[in-house]
Amino acid sequence: MMSMKSLLVSSALVLAAGIATGASAQDKLTLQLKWVTQAQFAGYYVAKDKGFYKEAGLDVTIKAGGPDINPSQVIAGGGADVIVDWMPSALATREKGVDLVNIAQVFQKSGMMLTCRKDSGVTAPKDFPGKTLGVWFGGNEYPFLAWMDKLGYATTGGSGVTVLKQGFNVDPILQKQAACISTMTYNEYWQVIDGGLKDSDLLVFKYEDQGVATLEDGLYTLGKHVKDPAMAAKLAKFVKASMKGWDWAAANSDAAAGIVLDNDASGAQTEKHQKRMMGEIAKLIGSNPKGTGYLDPAAYDRTVAVLMGGKSAPVITKKPEGAWTHEIFDKAK
């Protein structure tokens, strides 16, 4: 007959085994962000901080990006299960042979702009030729190149525009090295303002207004993951928890900015900037009647049309097949 002490020890072991089993039941998943830790990715940090991933049975690792990190290369090399990327970059990479598939589209609108100094003489796109324009590369240049091609402007100087390979700062416009630079509504534009220029000194050309907007900040995985039932189920849990995080972030903007700051290991971000950024990000998420993260096929078609619209150097040369799916989003719902 088992003694009371033995019974207690045995019960403790069973309980410990149960806890260990529960811990091991958490499915691991790695998300690679497109850029550094900031409110642009608040929904994912909220989902982790608030326990939404844990509730879904997931152990999610969020990997910050940076100037030397290409999310598409990371997932192609097996360093992530899901990535955040812009659709132009993802489709261009797909055409080169990496089977990227969009499984959710968080941003419904583009936040990309070309911000110009009024004293540069730019009053409209017709004034771009002969001017120096700052452009991000590393996959971010595609919307700009498609726009210039649509306008019929060469991007090699001469009678066209001179492209300045822009670093991830706003110095070229502050120091008058460029007439215009690439900015996002939620980030670099405000860095220009903080750098000393005023709204009245600037003219902005939003890609949305110019008819060349393309989809940004979608969630992408590899086609083989979508086809794997076990992985597809895990991805559906991830999408559901992530969109719950985004809904919370949009409804609690300042608090979400605080969570982002708590996760910023670099300490480079400021409370003022992150709160302002989160407010602008909420405008891009919108309120799709089918739910946060739903990819509107019409928006996808518009993006493809812009990328293929270039007469001399289209970003993609043929309409992609299988580049997106609602399968994971529907499972999440």
Image (cartoon, rainbow, N blue to C red):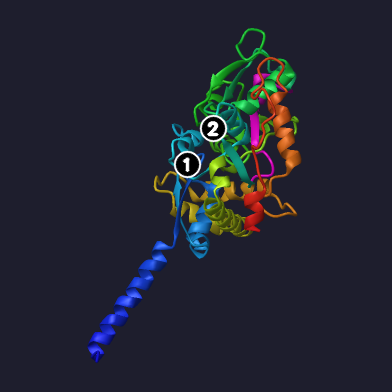
- Residue 162: % across, % down: 60, 15
Which residue is identified by label 1? 36
Q: Quadrant of residue 86?
A: top right
Q: Nearer the viewer, residue 115 or 120?
A: 115
Q: Nearer the viewer, residue 248 or 198?
A: 248
- Residue 281: % across, % down: 62, 47
- Residue 74: % across, % down: 46, 37
Tag 1, which secondary structure?
Answer: loop
Left or right of residue 227: residue 330:
right
Q: Nearer the viewer, residue 155 or 225?
A: 225
Q: Is residue 163 in view?
A: yes
Tag count in the figure?
A: 2
Q: Mark 2 or mark 1, which is nearer to you? A: 2
Kind of residue sitting beneath label 2: Val
**Where 300 falls versus 317 (above or below)?**
below
Segment colored magenta: 107-124
Q: Is residue 258 in view?
A: no
Q: Residue 120 in magenta?
A: yes
Dot 2: few (<14), some (14–19), or many (≥20) neighbours within 10 Å? some
Which residue is identified by label 2? 98
